[in-house]
Image (spheres, helix red, strand yellow):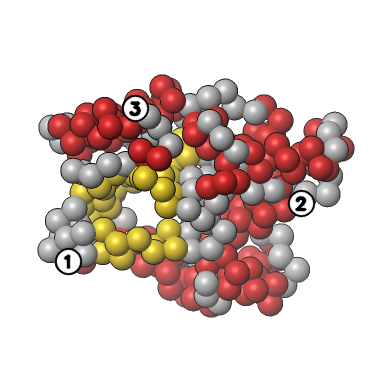
Amino acid sequence: MAGGSSYVERAPAPALATLVSSVWIQQVGDRPVAQRHEPHGGAELRCVLGEAPRLLGPLTTAMYREIPAGGTVVGVRLRPGVLGGLVGMSADELVDQDIAGIDIWRDVSRLTDLVGEAATPRAALAQLQSFVGRSAGELDPLVNEAVRNLMPWHSSGTAALPGLLSISERQLRRRCRAAVGVGPKELHRILRLRGFVARVQASIALRGASGVDLARWAVETGYHDQAHLSRECRRLLGGAARRVPRAVARHVHQRARARRVLHPDAPPRDGRFVQERRIAPA
């Protein structure tokens, strides 16, 4: 890959399937890398080997973080709704925050040692996953059901959620913010955009950039029109919708060497959407 860097994303350990959407190992070459992080509804626990782990809270806009030259990063991407129980506080306190793990978990120094002493990056990643499995609290079943209903391949928006879940709108918003970090409306915006990006990625992977049809896919993924999509791209990604196909094409190219399977969040094959990435099993 460019600059001698590599990035491999995998499915999590089977025991973490309800908590973690994916895990990754990134190895940086002889130049620092400005890593772009985009909103996806969850949070990320990551560690540059040799340093203490850090937690990137739920994002509401794209953010860059630099990885030093020669660095190796192992990371865990949490599913929406997991963060509150993992950190033992309301997740909305961590929105758009990049926080040292020592500020959240008292025993993280032991984790730093275990990750740093691991013989290989995969062994270090296994230690990070084990920590998540040990530390995660009980999930809020109501929030989990809300998240499921907000996924883009079968979402009808947020208006029907209180009735479906037999809860008031105010209570739903409070519990969603505590577990996820953002309310149902903001989460719906984020997941809808991820669905659109997934749709673009799937088409580019099959037919190349020439097969992209932004206007049609905008409507298919729940936007009023392409102008609505462009506003949401500027809000959540910091750019116009027309830039998305190029960015996704680069993403597909960079990960072309990885062995791939369907993302565990992907809908049935006869659905209209696929999830953001295809990833190799751990």
Residues marked 1 and 3 touching at CB (< 8 Å): no
Q: Which badge, 1 or 3, comes first in the chain's sequence?
A: 1
Secondary structure beneath dot 3 equals loop
Rendered position, 193 above or below 119: below
Q: Where is residue 260 in the image (x, y as percent from the top left)?
A: 35, 45
Mark 1 closeness class: few <14, some 14–19, many ≥20 residues within 10 Å: some
To which quarter of the image does residue 37 belong?
bottom left
| Residue 262 place in picture, x, y as percent | 45, 42
Q: Name the residue under label 1.
A: 31
Q: Mark 1 is on which residue type? A: Arg
Contact check, label 2 and label 1, Cβ < 8 Å? no
Quick check: 141 above or below 9? Answer: above
Label 1 element class: loop
Pick the front one: 110 or 197: 110
Q: From the image, which quarter does the N terminus lie in?
A: bottom left
- Residue at which label 2 appears: 157
Earlier sequence position, callout 3 versus callout 2: 3
Q: Where is residue 59 in the image (x, y as percent from the top left)?
A: 53, 55
Q: Circles 3 and 2: CB distance less than 8 Å?
A: no
**Viewer-nearest residue: 173 or 259:** 173
Question: Residue at (53%, 31%) from the top-left corner?
Answer: 88
The amino acid on which the numbered mark 2 sits, given as a three-letter code, is Gly
Q: Seen in the image, is 139 located left or right of residue 160?
A: left
Which comes before the other along the chain, label 2 or label 1?
Answer: 1
Q: In this view, does 222 lie above or below 75?
A: below
Residue denoted by label 3:
107
Label 2, secondary structure: give it: loop
